[in-house]
Amino acid sequence: MPTIDTSLVSRLIAAQFPKWADLPIRPVRFGGWDNRTFHLGSDMTVRLPSAAPYALQVEKEQRWLPVLAPRLPLSIPVPLAQGRPGEGYPWPWSVYKWREGEIATHAPIANLCAFATAVAEFLTALQKVDPADGPPPGQHNFFRGGPLAVYDAETRRALKALDGRIDTNAARAVWEAALVSTWHGTPVWFHGDVSSGNLLVEDGQLSAVIDFGTSGVGDPSCDLSVAWTFFHGESREVFRAALPLDRATWARGRGWTLWKALIVYAEVPGTDHLEVEKSRRVIEAVLTDHERFG
């Protein structure tokens, strides 16, 4: 497979969308890993999956984002065209309308509690969209929205690897509480990766939610991870109070969050790595929350 760079994007655009062939192309800052994203002119982006598992998400986003967009209170990506494999690149790809805004990871936020409320209101609206025929959990989203048991072996390996570095007994209790909890409601829409890197900010306010690659219809507990990965203190409590979800769903949300933090902590080499420290803080926040609410 060729390197995913501006040269490849230029060739794909020229071959498949010649009307845009003269527009400048440059990489998007903070473009992510699952997909490589490039500016196309001043108001479009080109998004190419970086590996085969992510290519499954292209058709889904093309099919469902136009359905979701008018039913949500914030902007989400708008697909303009779908590209075919070509120029040695083996997967489908997309052209989107460019959304202004800075990701919340790096942007100044005027009021984090108000921001938490806005995220919760967006997720509540998403859960109210008609789920009929929506994509159930599967390989396209790494089984988000399905039973946490899919990740049980992986989680227990990480716990074993981290013995002596974290409180594995407390972490195991969080995980097992999540495993015995089940979503009993009607399947609902979820985003699947509500993280600071997928929340756009303009003028200190939440302006858009991007990257619906792991979205689907099922258990919405996976969307709660932002409570521990981004919010803290009062903003976390505001986020919790603004979502009409039961204690069991929050228990599964802690489980989802713990799973990801554990595998990152266990797999990233070195104890001083930035990702390790971030994962350590998330694990501590989840364990503390479990003591209070579990």
Image (tube, rainbow, N blue to C red):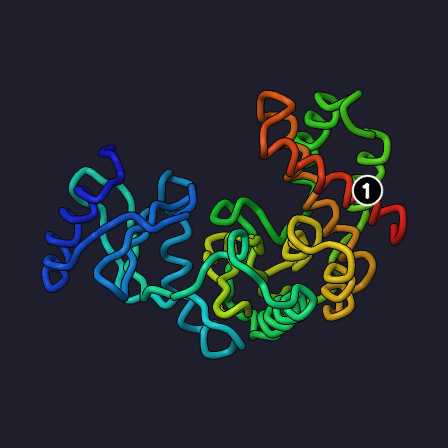
At horizontal 63% and vertical 31% (from top left) the residue drawn is 276
Position of 124 with respect to 71 (left or right) is right
At horizontal 51% and vertical 49% (from top left) the residue drawn is 141
Position of 182 with respect to 80 (left or right) is right
Pinpoint residue 98: horizontal percent, then vertical percent.
33, 64
Pinpoint residue 280: horizontal percent, then vertical percent.
70, 35
Image quadrant of residue 159? top right
At horizontal 60% and vertical 21% (from top left) the residue drawn is 270
Position of 219 with respect to 177 (left or right) is left
Position of 134 with respect to 165 (left or right) is left
Q: Vertical placement of 125 versus 96: above or below?
A: below
Q: Nearer the viewer, residue 96 or 199?
A: 199
Image quadrant of residue 97? bottom left
* Label 1, residues with CA under 10 Å away: few <14, some 14-19, many ≥20: many
**Kind of residue at disc 1:** Leu
Secondary structure found at label 1: helix
At horizontal 41% and vertical 58% (from top left) the residue drawn is 60
Q: How many marks?
A: 1
Residue assigned mark 1: 287
